[in-house]
Image (tube, rainbow, N blue to C red):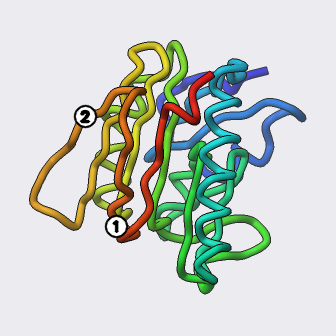
Amino acid sequence: MTLPQVNRDYTIEDIYNLPEGERAELIEGRIYDMAPPSRTHQEILMELSYQIKEYIKSKGGSCRVYPAPFAVFINADNKSYLEPDISVICDPNKLTDRGCNGAPDWIIEITSLGNAGHDYLKKLNLYEAAGVREYWIVDPQEEKIFVYFFEADWIARSYSFKDKIKVNIYGDLEMDFNDIVI
């Protein structure tokens, strides 16, 4: 049962009080239900997570990769709770048993029907303001990937599912979507 959308600010406590199995995100005091992901969504999620983890492991890196569901408390308040599809966190001091306190270094969101606006607008602005270094939006319906590297002057770059995409926070990692998409 979803919480009613009344004119009040919700908190992280409201998220933790949701019925068993119900997932939602909290953005600036508003609750947004999360639809179950599609098979394609999950295939992309697993392949990207695997490739990123294998890259970090091969380099002896200390960053950690967490696929959803994984809690990100993006701000130091109790009004935002997110579950990015993939979070890469390089600062171990941000990690607790509950999730990540603060901005991950790299976030990947895979759009689903009905929630794309959150990824393209609400989360984009929230992640940039919080200090996420790199943000990818993977859109299976449009077969596009939008890369935002907030440490550079450019706003976004667009790629197709036929492209190899350079990961900006790593100098020598490219994600080949020909190897990812099924």
In the picture, the quarter occupied by the C terminus is top right
Q: Nearest to the eye among marks 1 and 2: give it.
A: 2
Q: Is residue 144 above or below residue 48?
A: above
Q: Position of residue 108 (x, y in %)?
A: 49, 46
Q: Which mark is residue 9?
A: none
Q: Position of residue 132 (x, y in %)?
A: 38, 63
Pick the front one: 173 or 36: 173
Q: Which mark is residue 131?
A: 1
- Can residue 70 be seen here? yes
Residues at marks 1 and 2 touching, judged by CB atoms closer than 8 Å: no
Locate residue 120 relative to residue 75 in the image: left or right.
left
What is the quadrant of residue 47 in the picture?
top right
Pick the front one: 119 or 74: 119
- Can residue 29 be seen here? no
Q: Residue at x 24, y 60 (%)?
A: 150
Q: Which residue is mark 2?
A: 158
